[in-house]
Amino acid sequence: MNKTVNQKAWFLVLPVLVLVAFSAVIPLMTVVNYSVQDSFGDNVFFWAGLEWFRDMLQSERMWNALGRQLLFSAIILAIQIPLGIFVALNMPKKGVWASVCLVLMSLPLLIPWNVVGTIWQIFGRVDIGLLGHTLDALGIPYNYTQNTLAAWITVVVMDVWHWTSLVALLAYAGLQSIPDAYYQAAKIDQASRWKVFRYIELPKMAGVLMIAILLRFMDSFMIYTEPFVVTGGGPGNATTFLSIDLVKMALGQFDLGPAAAFSIMYFLTILLISWVFYTVMTNLDRQEGPQ
Amino acid sequence: MAKITLDNLAHSYLPNPASEDDFALKELNHDWRDGEAYALLGASGCGKSTLLNIISGLLEPSQGRILFDDVDVTHAPTAERNIAQVFQFPVVYDTMSVRDNLAFPLRNRGAEPDYVARRVQEIAQMIGMEAELDRKARGLTADAKQKISLGRGMVREDVNALLFDEPLTVIDPHMKWELRTQLKALHNEFGHTMIYVTHDQTEALTFADKVVVMYDGRVVQIGTPQELFERPAHTFVGYFIGSPGMNVMDAEIAGDVARVGGAEVPLAAGYAPPAGRVQIGVRPEFVRLTTGGAGLPARVTRIEDVGRHKIVRLMAGDVELSAIAPEGAAIAADADRVTFDPAGVNVYADDWRVVPDGEAA
C-alpha cells in the first residue's frame, strides 16, 4: 500500500496541540519549573536541582499523608464496591420503580462536592446537626472535630453516601446487559443463588466493575473538597489527605518548591496506577474474545 | 423420565386477556407420552417457545394445569421439575472450563465426583469436544458454545424430559446433521421424553416419532411425518410441511367430485356438503401435467431443477400451482392441463380438513 505523505496534515492537529498546551502542558511546566528552584520572594529564583524531590521523599509528613490516603481509598473501595453491587442486584429490573430508583440513585451524584461537605458538616455537628445531636443525646460520644475515629467515620460515611450510587449504577448497567437466557439456563441447571451470582452476574459485570474501581480509586485518591469542608484535615492531621496537605504546603506555607516537587510525584503515581488499570482492563477484554 | 400432561393449558402475556387473540398459547389438552421424541414445528412466534417454557417452569401458565406422571407441577419451580432445556442461542458459563460447564448441572445435584468425571467424558465424546475439555469456555466459537449447551442439557441421565428450543440454529450444516444423529442415538439409548422445537421441517421430520404442528398459538395437528404429509389436518400444515407446500384452490364439492373453476376434479371418497369456505389441497407430488383432454387448464410459467426432481410452477386461472416432476422426466412443451391423483386430494372447510365419508374421524 502506498502511503501519501503530506506534511500539511500537521496544521490540522495544530489547534488541538495549542489547546492542550495551554490547558495542560504549560501549567504543568510551571510546576516543573517551581520544583527545581527555590525563592525567597521578590520573584527571585535560585536553582535547587532535585533537592525538593529528595526532601519530599524523606518527609515523614508526606509519607503519613500517603498512608492515610491509601487507607481511606482502601476503606471506601471495600465498602462501596460490594454495597454498590448489592444495591444493583436488588434494584427492580424494569417498570416504573426501576426509573424511580435510577433517579433517586443519581441524586447524590448531582450534588456539588462542597455542598456535600457542607451538608455533612452541619448534619454531624453536635450542637445543631441532626446526626451529631441525636448521637450525643443517646450518650454515644461523637464529635468529629475532636475525635479521630469520629472524624474518619464521618468522612468515610459521607463518601459512601456520595459515591456508592455510581458503583450501583455501573453494576446495574452490567446486570441489565445479561440476557434472560442465562438466568433461565441457570434455573434449568439447578444453580443456587450464589452460583448464579458467582458464575453469571459477576463475570458479566467484571468489565464495568473494573471501571467502577478505577473511577472510585482515582477519585478517592485525589479527594479534597469534602473532607476539607467537614474536618479541614483534623483533628490534628487525622484526616489530612494528600491533596489537603499539598494545598496547605503550597498556599498555607507558601513552600512552592517542595509542593511542586510533591505535585509531580503525586501526578506520576496517579498516572502509573491508571496505566496499571488500563492494562488489566484491556487484557480482560482480550480474554473475552469476539462476542 | 415422565409422561407430561397438559390440562386445559393456555397462556397470555397480558395480565387480563380479553379475547382469544390475546392468548399466545390457546387452550390445549395433550399428553406427551413417556419416552417419545416429539418435534414441535411451526412458524416463528406461534407459541412454541411459550409452550416449552411452561413445561420447564420458566413461565407460569395463565390457566390450566401441567402434570408430570400425574403429579401437578403447575406452580413448582424449574429446579424441582428436574428438566433439561437447551436454548436457541448458546449459554455457557464464561469463566468456567468446558469440563466444569458440562459438570455444572451434575454438581448442583450433588453427584459423586467419580460419576461426574465419567459422565462428562462420555458427553464430551458425544459432542466431539474431548480435546477442549480444559479450555475456558470464554472465547470459543458460537457453535462450540452451543455444543457445550447441548452437552449440559444431556449430561443428567435422570431428567424428566429434555427440551430443545431450536438448538441447532447457530450450528453449521455438517455438524447439525451429526448432532441430530447424536440426539437421536441418545434418545434410543436412554428413552428420555424429548420435545424438540424447530421451524425447520427437515429437522422435525428426521428427529421425531411424532410431529406437533402449531399455528397461531394452537396445535393444529399431531401425527407421524407420514400422516402430516398425506393428510394435513389444516391448510397451514399442508403449506408449512413439504417443499414446495401444498396447492390450495377454492372449490365446490358435490359428492365425490370437486369443481374448480370450470373443471371437475375427481375425489377418492364422497363428502357431505361442507360449510364455510371450501378448498381442496393437493401436494405437488400428486399433480400431473397432461396435454389436452380432462383436467384443470394451466400454463407452465417456470421450471426449477433442484437436483433430485424438477419443480414446475404453473398458473391455473389466477391461482399459482406447483407440481413435482421426477428427475429426467420430460416436460411436454405443449402441456396445458393438470390432473390430480384422487388419493392425494384433501378437502378443507375454513382451513380445517373435512373427513370424507367412510374414514374414521
Image (spheres, rainbow, N blue to C red):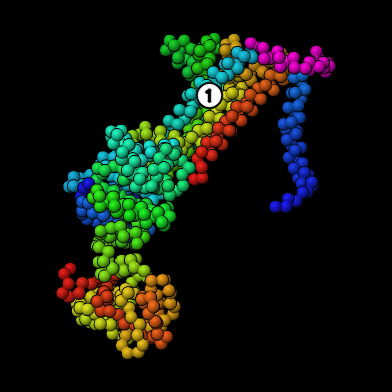
Residue positioned 28% across, 36% down in the render: B115
Q: Nearer the viewer, residue B252 or A11?
A: A11
Question: Which class describes the residues within 10 Å of circle 1: few (<14), some (14-19), or many (20+)?
Answer: many
Residue B274, located in which quarter of the rendered image?
Answer: bottom left
Q: Nearer the viewer, residue B173 or A280?
A: B173
Q: Is residue A104 magenta?
A: no
Q: Nearer the viewer, residue A182 or A231?
A: A182
Decide: is B307 above or below B107. Answer: below
The span shown in magenta is: A37-60
| Disc 1 secondary structure class | helix
Q: Chain of mark 1?
A: A
Q: Is residue A24 left or right of residue B103?
A: right
Q: Which residue is mark 1?
A: A159
Residue positioned 66% across, 25% down in the render: A268
Residue positioned 31% across, 45% down in the render: B154
Give amino acid for label 1.
Asp
| Residue B356 shows in the view | yes
Decide: is B94 above or below B14. Answer: above
Decide: is B18 above or below B249. Answer: above
Picture coordinates of residue B47 (x, y %)?
33, 56
| Residue B77 shows in the view | no
Picture coordinates of residue B55 (x, y %)?
27, 48
Q: Is residue A53 magenta?
A: yes
